[in-house]
């Protein structure tokens, strides 16, 4: 077979084929193909992450805003 097409699928079937991207949820580690809550697997994991931000569980390094205001 000289061409690179998959012999089990016609060219129309190959064109209509969906590519499913599987990713790992950063909260629970579950493999998922859900695009609705990407990069999370569910609303629960998305809410856990949001709660971490609200409770200052995540920190972005840099100068504190109060330090910047004192210098002006």
Image (spheres, rainbow, N blue to C red):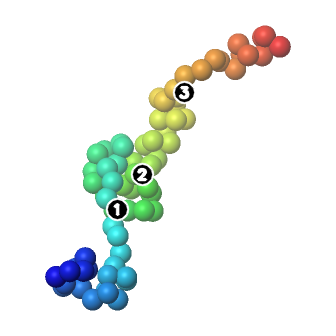
Of 38 and 5, the residue lying toward us: 5
Gap between marks 1 and 3, in whole Å?
29 Å
Label 1: few (<14), some or many (≥20) within 10 Å?
A: few
- For residue 24, say whether it is visible: yes
Q: Up-down: is 55 above or below 18?
A: above
**Numbered tag placed on residue 21 in the rendering:** 1
Gap between marks 2 and 1, in whole Å?
11 Å
Residue at image mark 3:
60
- For residue 44, say whether it is visible: no
Farthest-out residue, right: 72
**Numbered tag placed on residue 45 in the rendering:** none
Element marked by disc 1: loop
Q: Quadrant of residue 37?
A: bottom left
Q: Are marks 1 and 3 in contact (CB under 8 Å)?
A: no
Element marked by disc 2: loop
Q: Quadrant of residue 22?
A: bottom left
Marks 2, 1: nearer the viewer: 1
Q: Up-down: is 29 above or below 8?
A: above
User: Looking at the image, is mark 2 or mark 1 earlier in the sequence?
Assistant: 1
Marks 1, 3: nearer the viewer: 1
Residue at image mark 2:
39
Of 4 and 32, the residue lying toward us: 4
Gap between marks 2 and 3, in whole Å?
19 Å
Residue located at (52% from left, 35% from top): 53
Residue located at (33% from left, 54% from top): 23
User: Looking at the image, is mark 2 or mark 3 earlier in the sequence?
Assistant: 2
Question: Dividing the image into 4 quarters, which one contains the N terminus?
Answer: bottom left
Element marked by disc 3: loop
What percent of the width, then of the height, locates residue 17?
34, 79
Of 52 and 6, the residue lying toward us: 6
Farthest-out residue, left: 1
């Amino acid at each position: 077979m000289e061409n690179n097409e998959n012999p089990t699928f016609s060219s129309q079937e190959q064109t209509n084929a969906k590519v499913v991207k599987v990713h790992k949820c950063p909260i629970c580690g579950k493999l998922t193909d859900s695009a609705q809550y990407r990069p999370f697997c569910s609303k629960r994991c998305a809410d856990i992450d949001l709660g971490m931000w609200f409770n200052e569980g995540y920190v972005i390094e840099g100068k504190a805003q109060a330090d910047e205001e004192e210098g002006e």
